[in-house]
Amino acid sequence: MNSLLQFRRLAGVLILLIPFAAQAGSFSLNEQSVSGLGTAFAGGAAQAEDASTLFFNPAGIARLEQGELQLAGHLVIPSANFNNEGSRYVLPGTPFDGLPLSGGDGGDGGATRVIPNVYLTQPIFRHTRHGDLSLGLALSAPFGLETNYEPGWVGRYQALRTRLRTFDIQPTVAYRFLDCISLGAGLNIQHASARLTQAIDFGLIAQPALGQFFAGLPAALAAQGVPPALIGPTIAATQQAYADAGFVPGGVDGVSEVEGGDWSVGYNLGALFEYRKGSSDSLLQEGRFGVNYRSKIDHTIEGSGEFRGVPTITAPGAPVQFPIPTALQDVFFDQAASAQLNLPDILRFSIYQRFARQFAIMGDITWTHWRRLQTVPIVFQNPATPTSVLEINYDDSFRYALGLEWYPTPCLTLRLGFSYDETPIKSAEFRNPRIPDNNRYFLGTGFKWSVTHFMDLDVGYAHLFVNQPDVDLLDDQGHSLRGNFDASVDIVSAALTFRWGGPREIAPSAGKDVAGYRK
């Protein structure tokens, strides 16, 4: 039964995971804005300078003077190389206790992928008395992970391939009143799909049944009239035949693959307060601060499980054959499965401050309620396969960011940013190779070039320095994976923003004015 429980727990990881990309802690993705990437997403809820504010603060679209369409893509290039440090079997009271796990280091588990964003905004009306109303629509991927290791690697029983993809459709409305306070709200209509493969140690799983079989052989052989002198050699020959057939730990591997998907709905709320509008002070000009809350989303992932390479418990040449050769196949067969995935809610505070007319500084603190993700119950269609619980044990996490923008000309913005991002993983004992995550430092840079009065080009680059993720993971079958990862991430991003419609009348100092012109 422990073997079945381990498999179900491994299967449940599918429901959680996607690219070991540039996650904002675990498998949350911050790659939702190219302009934000250049400042390490500092000021995400307050910057509000293009349509990508839809994701970080829906209230920000009330600041946009014209209709905008932004098409963006982020090429995420992760690297995750495992270094084995004594991975072994932990099976007290058995002859297999302490044996090393076979296999290599798995190669680079990172999977290069593109994360797309599409944003559309449109001012509906601008009125000095009744305020400003804007609508927007965002298409984004807020959570995701993908890792892919070589077959036969030392951690194959914990992970081979993992993929989680989410897709958000976010209709949004924003309203500004008193010319300085904006409120925004949006729905998050989200689809989550997941796929997981891992090896199954059938050689180990068969041991309890074979142990009972071998223990009962003396009485069974005696009852069949086998001479006492031959009973011992017959049992030894049978045991050797099953060992030669691979029924020892690591001797016979199969593969399981689980897939599933679900639609669910959440919401997000935002507020933006603009201060010092119209200030002619030579040191500090306009500023704003914003807050954004993205709600939790609960998914009931429904899908199927497929099992390949499930062996019959037989051994050529064995004097006595196991009486139920299909015992494994009676348990590990294709069937439906479901699991509950509770994605976290996120709270973000940001500030933007213009100074010396040509510069702006931004800051951000983001809190992610990862503590919601403690366990994932997994239910299989077969009533004989009991419900299992995947232990996650995440902690809440914080992200801190600081960014700088420089506006040297009306057509050019230069960006630089730094952030520190905490992992929700408590310790090496809870770190699964499907998410080789740890605290990381994020360094980003980029620029915006206004090609024409109706089109902007944004480009960004970032590198993530990941603290060494140590792994000391023991599963319920007794596979102890020990080692660490060399991990890092590079991100290259680009976006085109198209604008239409004439600007509304504004105060001379509103927006990004540099020596008398407006950006």
Image (tube, helix red, strand yellow):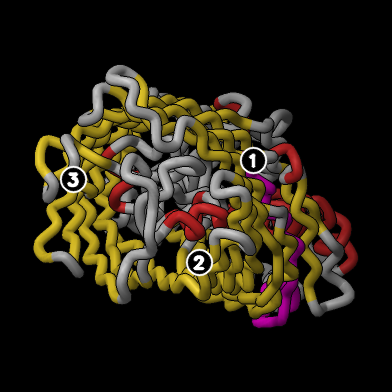
> Is residue 135 located in the magenta-colored stretch of the structure?
no
Residue at 70 percent of width and 64 percent of height: 266
Secondary structure beneath dot 3 equals strand
Q: Nearer the viewer, mark 2 or mark 1?
A: 2
Magenta residues span 330-347
User: Is the C-beta separation of discs 3 and 1 under 8 Å?
Assistant: no
Q: Observer-nearest residue: 461 or 335? A: 461
Question: Residue at label 1?
Answer: 347
Disc 1 crowd rating (10 Å Cα; few below 14, some 14-19, many 20+) is some
Q: Is residue 493 above or below residue 488?
A: below
| Position of residue 465 measured from the top left corner of the image (x, y, whole percent) | 31, 28
Magenta stretch mostly in which secondary structure? strand
Residue at 56 percent of width and 44 percent of height: 180
Disc 2 crowd rating (10 Å Cα; few below 14, some 14-19, many 20+) is some
Q: Observer-nearest residue: 470 or 353? A: 353
- Find the residue positioned furthest to the front: 129
| Position of residue 365 measured from the top left corner of the image (x, y, whole percent) | 54, 29
Instruction: Say whether residue 330 is left or right of residue 513.
Output: right
Q: Is residue 323 above or below residue 510?
A: below
Residue at 63 percent of width and 65 percent of height: 186
Task: Name the mark on residue 517.
Answer: 3
Task: Name the mark on residue 310.
Answer: none
Question: Residue at label 2?
Answer: 126
| Position of residue 294 measured from the top left corner of the image (x, y, whole percent) | 65, 52
Distance from Cα at disc 2 to Cα at disc 1: 29 Å
Amino acid identity at mark 2? Arg
Q: Is residue 470 above or below residue 436?
A: above
